[in-house]
């Protein structure tokens, strides 16, 4: 937790100035460095300004599939967590190619709808034309720890392993997508998290201890409803905010004001920090409600949301349009729908 530095321990010498009720006093060497750093941190965090309110919390347990809205969640280093639900802790892999199945090439994945049942001990999957599939997450966690069945996954510069969820899960997805060689893999809680800074292009924008699950960019994606509404108003057909697959949505904001946010505090607890604007690709063309692809969506976003400000240019690695923020955890805690959102600029 970031707190105001204690006066008695940090300021034992002659007062140089007083500001905001704090005294800064003369000292030398390491003590001065520690003091100035503590003051800088306190001043930075004291500059939080209320910018809106949490309107949605969404966990996507299976990468590329539909999310689950929750009313509260834990903010952990690898993303939102609610009971056994962890963001992007599952992924569908083509083991013949060693790559994951993307939403852009498999838009019907967005119709795979997870839900919590059995008192929260299992994830159930439903999809058009399919029987319900039950995934016993607690059993998977036990097997992954005691009898691991690893599957290797490669995505650009990222290399990782997941635990194979078994033949029943694999056959369910093979039947649904009519594709062979598919396996559902799970990232257990005991597995080493994926480092965000291992990607060659955007890695330099992340800190060495920034981690994620199967997110492939960052552990949090934040969007504001006002920016989504402004963009949706430019389209012929309205689209849901879930096209952009955010974890946290914020209401009562000014459109695109989030471009300037640095630290974001959720309620009185968790703090997340912007690492880069979210650079958008063809994934947003897939309608999250019906799986229909509309190529005009990315084209229209590109027409007015390419980075032009110099401050933002240093935080992007492509010419793609931006919408939303890729963020990582600074302080853990619990966030609830309706919490105030504060930010520094």
Image (spheres, rainbow, N blue to C red):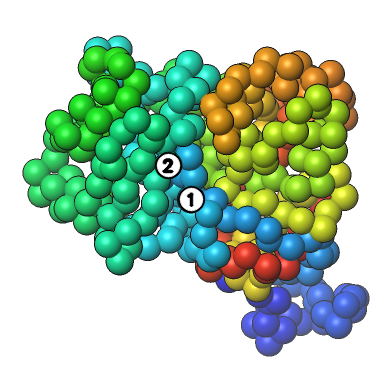
Q: Quadrant of residue 148?
A: top left
Of tags 2 and 1, the one toward the viewer is 2
| x and y, in percent, of residue 342 in the image | 76, 63
Residue 110, above or below 87: above
Q: Foreground residue, 83 or 161? A: 83
Q: Foreground residue, 274 or 250? A: 250
Quickly name the residue at label 2: 113
| x and y, in percent, of residue 264 in the image | 70, 57
Which residue shows up at 81% across the image and 26% down it? 235
Quickly name the residue at label 1: 68
Q: Quadrant of residue 30?
A: bottom right
The residue positioned farthest toward the top in the image shown: 97
Determine crowd level at label 2: few under 14, some 14-19, many 20+ residues with C-alpha closer than 10 A.
Answer: some
Look at the image and tell me whether residue 24 can be seen: yes
Residue 143, above or below 289: below
Residue 73 shown left or right of residue 53 in the figure = left
Secondary structure of the residue carrying numbered label 2: strand
Look at the image and tell me whether residue 88 can be seen: no
Which residue shows up at 73% across the image and 80% down it? 11
Secondary structure of the residue carrying numbered label 1: strand
Residue 325 shown left or right of residue 52 in the figure = left
């Amino acid at each position: 937790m970031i707190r105001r530095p204690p006066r008695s321990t940090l300021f034992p010498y002659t007062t140089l100035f007083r500001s905001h009720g704090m005294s800064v006093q003369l000292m030398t060497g390491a003590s001065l460095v520690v003091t100035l750093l503590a003051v800088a941190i306190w001043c930075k965090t004291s500059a939080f300004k209320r910018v809106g309110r949490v309107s949605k919390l969404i966990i996507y347990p299976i990468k590329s599939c539909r999310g689950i809205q929750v009313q509260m969640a834990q903010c952990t280093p690898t993303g939102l967590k609610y009971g056994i639900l962890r963001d992007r802790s599952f992924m569908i892999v083509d083991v013949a190619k060693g790559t994951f199945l993307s939403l852009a090439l498999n838009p019907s994945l967005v119709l795979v709808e997870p839900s919590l049942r059995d008192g929260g001990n299992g994830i159930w999957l439903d999809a058009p034309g399919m029987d319900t599939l039950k995934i016993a997450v607690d059993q998977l966690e036990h097997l992954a720890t005691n009898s691991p069945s690893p599957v290797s996954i490669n995505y650009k510069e990222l290399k990782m392993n997941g635990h194979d969820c078994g033949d029943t899960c694999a056959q369910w997805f093979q039947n649904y997508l009519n594709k062979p060689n598919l396996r559902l893999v799970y990232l257990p809680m005991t597995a080493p998290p994926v480092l965000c800074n291992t990607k060659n292009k955007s890695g330099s924008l992340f800190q060495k201890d920034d981690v994620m699950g199967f997110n492939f960019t960052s552990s949090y994606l934040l969007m504001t409803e006002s920016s989504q509404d402004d963009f949706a108003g430019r389209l012929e057909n309205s689209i849901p905010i879930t096209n952009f697959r955010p974890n946290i949505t914020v209401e009562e904001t000014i459109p695109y004001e989030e471009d300037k946010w640095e630290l974001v505090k959720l309620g009185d607890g968790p703090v997340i920090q912007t690492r880069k604007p979210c650079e958008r690709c063809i994934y947003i063309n897939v309608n999250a409600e019906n799986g229909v692809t509309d190529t005009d969506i990315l084209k229209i976003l590109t027409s007015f949301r390419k980075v032009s400000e110099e401050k933002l240019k240093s935080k992007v690695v492509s010419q793609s349009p931006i919408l939303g923020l890729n963020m990582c955890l600074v302080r853990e805690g619990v966030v609830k729908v309706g919490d105030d959102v504060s930010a520094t600029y």
